[in-house]
Image (cartoon, rainbow, N blue to C red):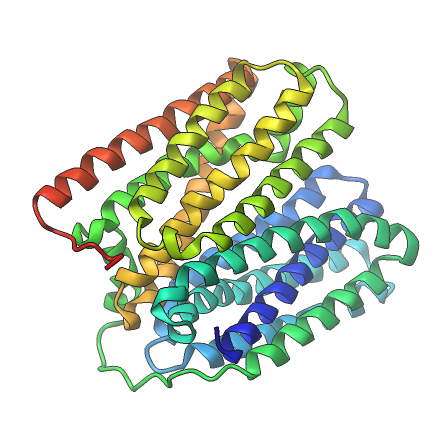
Amino acid sequence: MNKSFYYLWVSISFGKLALSIYTMTITLTIYSFTHSATLASVVMLIHVIGKVLSSFVFPLTTENTPLKKILSLSLFTQMLIIAFLLGVLIMEINQVLQLTFIYSLICLAGFMDGFVSPSRMSLIPELVEDTKIGKANSLISTTDQTFALLGWSVGTIAISYYGSSWVLLASFTLLMLSFFSSLKLKTTKVKEAKKRPKWETIKAGWFILFSKKNHMRTITTMDILEGIASGIWIGGISLVFVKEVLKKGEQWWGFINTSYFAGSIIGGILITLFSIKLQKHLIKGIITGSFMVSILVFFYAVNTTAWIALALVILMGPFYQLRDISQQTYIQKVAVDNTLSKLYAAKDNLYYLIFALSVFITGMISDYIGVVYVYYLAFILYLASTIFAIFTFQKGNRSAQILDIGN
């Protein structure tokens, strides 16, 4: 690993922590002065809407602008937005006007954040040796989970002791560190691209997502199936499961969430240790991860004992990480360098669309059939994803459509 990767790693880590603290702080602040759960929950929705909008613009910016510059400008703009948010919260103005300013800034922050994720992930193959891409993804994924857990667990305590303004200032400081770390990156400059219609540029990433080449269509289909299944971890669904199936209070909902992060962190560490071996068997890693998650989700659905549920969630973490890191590494190794950023932009957009669909489907099943059936559906979807992957990967190998990328 070279210095540039570690600067990227630091930038991602501080940025992740800043985002989790900022989102939680604004959500709790809006709830505190409106006493409306609906208005508070709108924060995340508006942030996601901003990210979806940016995913259509991002491919156009990558045509002539280096990813490092896009990343740095996005982080700097987010710093300014948090500074403005601090000012709006301090100002004594009409509440409706104040909420309008806050939601507008949140949408803009989400828009700029939509440039950050695909830029970072596209930079990894450029900064890391080919044989160490798997290890790099493992380190970043582990840190992501660790800082997300730290932000959500420590953030509420910090707000109660120091107030939202000071916590937002801490978020601003973390973003500033993330920004300065991004300036230290040394990457290859993007050459000027040939002029082509804007729509052709925007749809380039979508074309790759559903291309048969290098099994991208298979991976995208798995993402769709498993993306719908991921609704089992939406806060409302998980809370209802804890209360109605496990017969426990809200504190156990917190235990389940903490166990999920803990399992992911453990999984990330394990995969980091065995990253070289994993990189030779990425397709097996994707399939094994999905299959084991399906089995563990089934046992989670039929179980009614809280302690066993915690153990199952912890066990899921390593297999979630195995699947996600294997897929991430696979994509970075087979995708053409100048299309990787556009691919990630389309992938992020698809994720948000599937997430919205998942919220709707899981909510309907939970309300009208029963929350346990949400988990049965998830088991079926994960298993279907696994079977589909085995069939298509084997068919592709027989047709000699893909080379062994581990060699």
Nearer-the-camera pick, 392 or 273 = 273
Position of residue 228 in the picture relative to residue 311 (left or right): left
Q: Image point 84% across, 63% down: which residue?
A: 165
Query: Furthest-left residue in view?
Result: 399
Residue situated in front as seen by the camera: 314 or 234: 314
Q: Is residue 315 left or right of residue 200?
A: right
| Coordinates of residue 251 in the picture (x, y in percent) | 78, 29
Residue occupying image coordinates x 83% and y 58%:
164
Residue found farthest to the right: 161
Q: Is residue 178 above or below residue 156?
A: below
Q: Position of residue 372 (x, y in %)?
A: 54, 17
Q: Is residue 288 above or below residue 148?
A: above
**Left or right of 403 on screen, residue 4:** right
Q: Position of residue 378 (x, y in %)?
A: 44, 26
In the image, residue 14 above or below residue 218: below
Instruction: Name the residue rendered at 81%, 61% in the picture.
Output: 167
**Residue 353 can be seen, yes or no:** no
Q: Residue at x 48, y 50 (%)?
A: 271
In this view, the residue in front, 133 or 163, is: 133
Q: Quadrant of the C terminus?
A: bottom left
Where 146 falls versus 35 (above or below)? below
